[in-house]
Amino acid sequence: MKPVLMTWRHYAAGSLALLLVPLLVLPRGAVADSALDSQVEDIVARDIASAATEDDPGGVAFAVYAAGHTRFFNYGLADEAARRRVTPDTLFNLASLRKVFEATLVALGTLRGELSLDDPVSKYVGELRSDDLRRITIGELATHTSGLLLPTDHPPWPNESYSLAGFFDLLNAWRPGADAAPGKQRIYSHAGYVLLQLALERRYGLPIGKLIEQRILTPLGMTATLIPERGPDNRAIMGPELMQRVVQGYSDKGTAIGPPGSQQSYYDFPGTGQMFSSARDLSIFLSACLDGSAADPQLGQALRMTQKEMFRVSGQFGQAMAWENVDVDGIGIVDKPGGLNNATAYMGLVPARKLGVLLLANRGEFPHEIARYRVLPALARLLSRQSRNERDAN
């Protein structure tokens, strides 16, 4: 299916201006923008649309930030039963993309002198009993280098959920493996970020959702991103207007999983539900990560700080604060994937080119690696060629 391509420039110009554009003699810059739009659309159509056809379950919201503009591409259905189509304002489950927001809180706190990456987590969370846990630092939790690995982090997945007391019991029963030590390896840990959430809540005396809202969302002007609490039916508690925009999630085989707004988590205490956002709202965060446009200079600095590699994993991969660093054919990419059995999310940056992409899908196991290994490199090469052509023209 062919998507509708929309940019901030188009929204600003208005529908009448769009109708008149073919009658106008456009300046060189506008012609260049139009040519870039066309080439970006070709890349997205080739690599993303092919995985989001009418025969595939659910839909995809894709956004590209390049040359100072955000372009939106929408495919498929937010809810197949209701025949509701995906738009830039459709609300998706962000899965582990939430972690970049918590990492940003950590970075902002260090810049403001409110906490330190070297602080032991036990400074804020007193329920930790073993020395192995108590010496893990905030920085190690943020970079997945704590060594912490609980049953909720890997298959075979547990069948139960955990209260706060149960989570502490699970933590205190953990012992590191013989080859695991804080700061010495990278082991991806959902539980580590739940512990980090608790440390942040204890440090600031506020729920994690309120912290993210006050310190990140409001300063950036993001109004459609939230971590809702769960209701008795295990669905997100949202107003009717927001709930009407939430997707229905599907498995990769097309089976509906849970109702719209379903909260999937092994943890059953406040703040551990899913984060929701739209492509339009999340693109504000994407652009702020790249162009430093945050109204709060310290917030802009914190966004850049989270992207810097802090642990070398292999020759190609490094670990930053939540973000991953990867070299793809000489192109430096900073990205973060996320996924559940009914949702896929991805955000990728090429800081050297001020380039970024965002992918939100209401399908489990959507092949988000396409964005890392095909879309971002192709777009980076396109911008590089455009830059050379502009230099030659001058």
Image (cartoon, grey):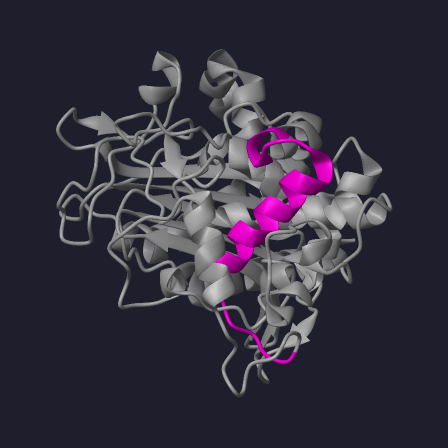
Q: Is residue 154 left or right of residue 259?
A: right
- Look at the picture and state if 280 lies above or below 64: above
Q: Position of residue 89 (x, y in %)?
A: 42, 26
Q: Determine if the magenta segment contains residue 46.
A: no
Total residue callouts: 0
Q: Is residue 18 left or right of residue 385?
A: left
Direction right: furthest residue: 113
Direction bottom: furthest residue: 178
Q: Is residue 190 visible?
A: no
Q: In percent of the image, x 45 and y 41: which residue is there?
A: 272
Q: Nearer the viewer, residue 220 or 132?
A: 132
Q: Nearer the viewer, residue 312 or 293?
A: 312
- Look at the picture and state if 346 lies above or below 139: above
Q: Which residues are magenta?
A: 184-210
Magenta: main secondary structure equals: helix
Q: Nearer the viewer, residue 247 or 111?
A: 111
Q: Position of residue 271 (x, y in %)?
A: 49, 37
Q: In percent of the image, x 38 and y 36: which residue is there?
A: 92
Q: Position of residue 76 (x, y in %)?
A: 24, 38
- Look at the picture and state if 321 lies above or below 10: below
Q: In percent of the image, x 35 and y 58: which residue is there?
A: 47
